[in-house]
């Protein structure tokens, strides 16, 4: 059986690694962090995953938290200053979503990978290490997330819409938020001209929590994280934003406490699609996977879902390829299989980062009056292909809303 080396023990790398082991491949994963370092480190994501991606994990027996802290719906609101909302609707997901803190999940998955016979090495991989991996393996896959090494892959100008960060991002993990009524949900708030705020239940190291996600328009009043020093100031800034721009959410959040001092994160990055094949100085090739080659803004909560679907697509491509060598044609084909799905996620996500079109506003407003439209929209997070052509084409939207009405 072929030997496959993967760089990065995150959502994409570990899921693919475990899937390959199950099919009899020899697999080496190299991670620049031990499980303990990940567990004792800073939060990395809000990592909300929808049912199709969770099913990929169930299929591999990686669903160690099945049924815990379910996210049962999506609420969409456009808050107005002083309280209340210009628009507000919610709908249930057909099957729950879930967010497991990657500090909890990845160390557990590393253990599962080793228990299944995988070799886990700890090293920070650069070009010399990639060359070594290339010599000893039939295929090298780089799943290094936002790690530096991913920048070796050339940016794909035709597939990348932006060359600068579009949002200032922040995460605040808290305990003690007042539960929303009826069912749990991602409460997504779009504050025109300011940014987006969404919040939902998750499981962290200290038990169930809520994750606040701030997406501030660059240079705007939700982009003051650079002035913040330390976790307490980060928490206070989170509450300031809610008090001023999302008052309904402030009301249920004002008595929260941070989960832990490392339960906060702030940063920004340009959403970037890269060419999936890296040519090493020796002429050897490596294939990119997950965020390393398809990095989206988190505003639609799709990155971990994408990473999971990438791992599933690459596993299928490797199995279909049989005994033939893993050449450039194989690598491009594996990525295109994934891109056939991911391009819809990328287009939807990039669209959300721009001012909403009239068409998008019409569809979102219709959801307030028609529960079927709300249900369609909420469940589109599970498979964003279903948003198209409606969100991109006014005629398709009219036809869709006409039928739904
Ligand atoms: C603020 C924020 C909120 C988010 N919220 C969501 C959400 O709600 N839902 C969602 O689906 N997605 C969300 N995401 C995105 C999601 O977390 C990522 O898309 C996902 O984790 C990508 O998986 P990956 O396997 O590609 O990379 P990662 O999970 O980042 O894993 C990469 C691994 O590679 C390791 N590594 C890096 N460089 C090297 C190297 N040189 N050598 C060895 N190892 C290396 C890293 O340490 C890391 O462990 C969010 C992201 C952010 C920033």
Image (spheres, helix red, strand yellow):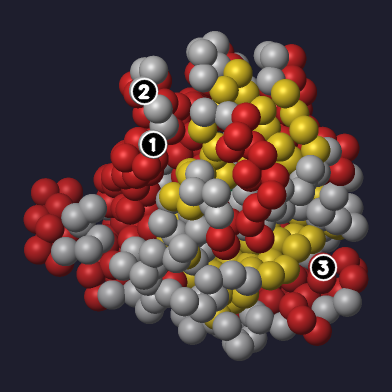
Quadrant in the picture for residue 7:
top right
Query: For mark 1, what is the residue?
Result: 327
In the depicted structure, whether residue 95 falls above or below residue 294: above
Earlier sequence position, callout 3 versus callout 1: 3
CB within 8 Å, label 3 to label 2: no
Q: Viewed as shown, does residue 194 lie left or right of 234?
A: left
Residue at point 76%, 52% (across, down):
43
Q: Secondary structure at mark 1?
A: loop
Q: Secondary structure at mark 3?
A: helix
In the depicted structure, whether residue 7 falls above or below residue 266: above
Name the foreground residue: 54 vs 324. Answer: 324
Q: Position of residue 219 (x, y in %)?
A: 61, 88
The numbered dot on residue 324 is: 2
CB within 8 Å, label 1 to label 2: yes
The Cα atoms of the two marked residues, 3 and 1, are separated by 49 Å
The numbered dot on residue 235 is: 3
Q: Position of residue 281 (x, y in %)?
A: 55, 54
Residue at point 64%, 86% (across, down):
221
């Amino acid at each position: 059986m072929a030997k496959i080396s993967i760089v990065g023990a995150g959502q994409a790398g570990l899921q693919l690694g475990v899937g390959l082991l199950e099919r009899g491949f020899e697999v080496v994963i190299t991670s620049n962090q031990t499980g303990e370092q990940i567990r004792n480190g800073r939060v990395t994501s809000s990592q909300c995953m929808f049912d199709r991606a969770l099913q990929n994990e169930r299929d591999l027996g990686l669903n160690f938290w099945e049924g815990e802290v379910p996210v049962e719906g999506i609420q969409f609101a456009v808050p107005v200053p002083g309280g209340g909302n210009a628009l507000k609707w919610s709908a249930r997901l057909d099957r729950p979503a879930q967010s497991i803190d990657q500090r909890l999940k990845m160390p557990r998955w590393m253990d599962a990978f080793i228990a299944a016979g995988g070799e886990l090495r700890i090293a920070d991989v650069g070009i010399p290490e990639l060359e070594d991996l290339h010599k000893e393996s039939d295929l090298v896959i780089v799943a290094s997330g936002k790690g530096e090494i991913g920048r070796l892959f050339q940016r794909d100008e035709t597939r990348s819409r932006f060359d600068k960060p579009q949002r200032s991002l922040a995460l605040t993990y808290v305990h003690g938020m007042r539960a929303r009524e009826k069912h749990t949900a991602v409460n997504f708030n779009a504050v025109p001209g300011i940014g987006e705020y969404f919040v939902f239940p998750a499981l962290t190291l200290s038990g169930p929590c809520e994750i606040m996600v701030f997406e501030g328009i660059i240079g705007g009043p939700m982009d003051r994280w650079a002035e913040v020093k330390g976790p307490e100031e980060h928490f206070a800034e989170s509450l300031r934003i809610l008090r001023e721009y999302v008052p309904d959410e402030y009301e249920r959040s004002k008595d929260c406490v941070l989960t832990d001092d490392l339960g906060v994160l702030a940063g920004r990055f340009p959403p970037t699609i890269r060419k999936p094949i890296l040519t090493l100085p020796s002429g050897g090739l490596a294939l990119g996977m997950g965020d390393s080659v398809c990095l989206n803004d988190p505003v639609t909560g799709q990155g971990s879902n994408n990473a999971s679907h990438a791992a599933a697509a690459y596993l299928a491509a490797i199995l279909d390829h049989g005994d033939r060598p893993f050449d450039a044609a194989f690598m491009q084909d594996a990525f295109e299989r994934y891109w056939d799905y991911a391009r819809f996620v990328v287009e939807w996500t990039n669209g959300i980062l721009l001012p909403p079109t009239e068409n998008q506003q019409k569809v979102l407003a219709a959801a307030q009056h028609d529960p079927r439209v709300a249900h369609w929209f909420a469940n589109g997070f599970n498979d964003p292909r279903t948003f198209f052509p409606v969100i991109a084409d006014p005629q398709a939207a009219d036809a869709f809303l006409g039928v739904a009405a």
